[in-house]
Image (spheres, rainbow, N blue to C red):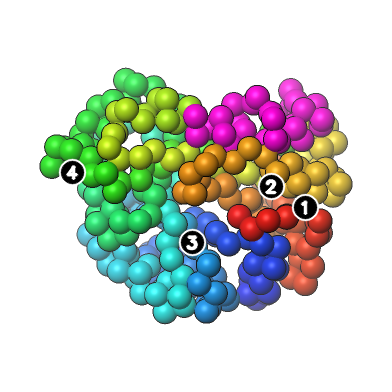
Amino acid sequence: KDDSAQYMLRFYEAGIRRFRIWHGDCWGDAACSYWTLQQASDALAGKPDVKFQVTLMTPSIQPDSDIEHALGKIAEIIAANGHSISSIQIDHVGTNPSESVLCLRGFGPGHAAFTSVISRVVQVHQSFPDAVVSLPWQQNSDSACWTPFLEALRQGFDGAFPASLKLGFHTTVYPFWQDSLSIETALGDVKQGSASSNNFNKLQERVQQNFGDEVAPATVVAAVSEIGWANGCDGISRSAVSQKSTQANQCTFITNVVGTDWPATPDFEAFYFAGWPYDGWGDGNDCSSNWSPFTATDSLCPNSWGQSR
């Protein structure tokens, strides 16, 4: 969008300091350009507290031969503007890594992307040793999948996980979409004191319990790759969703998320989905606009953001 830079400034003014760039801009046979990262970083040039999450796309889109170049390009972009990388997502099955699940489609030693994922984790850690290397978890901790993968990953690090490695496990959190949840319950799903498995501290506790010992002395970090609440759904036919999609509810949800129980680790991240309008599917089951709580000039929830995250 032509006004993307203005949007980035609105985000920054609201206290947001971490930004997720989910696509590597890989088109045709050319190497992934990370053009979107370039535009976002340029918009906030000279602000050293800005951090980005970026993505290595699925091997069918971004081949192994492109990874070294991609990591160098990412480093070049952020260094020029005084920024840093907080985390790098590694995708293996889908175009949007936040919607991928590692333990899906028979993922294991025989999967076509298995070796690629292993080598990419190692390469990312070598290039960005302070960044979290984030894998698509989606709250699926199936040991039959994860244990052989993590053991193979250990071997990728010459038989022992480095203590400096921060391994991320990301999921999406969208109580907005759950028809079974009332408005009140959905709004309180991620809120201080909530016992929901989606609450941020609960996600970190579960990741630590399920994977902490297995990857020690490396550390494990939960992450929310997408969370959001639309303030209008013109294309939706599900009344349970359309009733939730008001501006007041969006602002309440953001207030609750900002004030919830955040894990103690500074590496935990949650990315609020504020995407541009897109062409709907026309099946009455989508919400293709009104996700952003910002316009190019204003915040629609000016009292909701609070402290910087």
Determine the secondary structure under disc 1. loop
Label 3, residues with CA under 10 Å away: few <14, some 14-19, many ≥20:
many
- In percent of width and height, residue 31 lies at 33, 67
Label whose residue precedes the other's in the sequence (4 or 2): 4
Which residue is disc 4 drawn over? Answer: 157
Q: Nearer the viewer, mark 4 or mark 2?
A: 2
Q: Does the residue at mark 2 contact the one at mark 3 (Cβ under 8 Å)?
A: no
Determine the secondary structure under disc 2. helix
As for residue 184 lying within the magenta part, the answer is yes
Q: Does the residue at mark 2 contact the one at mark 1 (Cβ under 8 Å)?
A: yes
Q: Does the residue at mark 1 contact the one at mark 4 (Cβ under 8 Å)?
A: no
Q: Nearer the viewer, mark 1 or mark 3?
A: 1
Q: What's the CA distance linking mark 4 and mark 2?
A: 37 Å
77, above or below 140, in the image: below
Where is the C terminus found, in terms of image quarters? bottom right
Location of residue 192 (image quadrant): top right
Determine the secondary structure under disc 4. loop
Q: What's the CA distance linking mark 3 and mark 4?
A: 25 Å
What is the magenta range?
178-205
Which residue is disc 1 drawn over? Answer: 304
Location of residue 143 (image quadrant): top left
Label whose residue precedes the other's in the sequence (1 or 4): 4
The answer to whether any part of residue 203 appears in the image is: yes
Q: Which mark is residue 67?
A: none
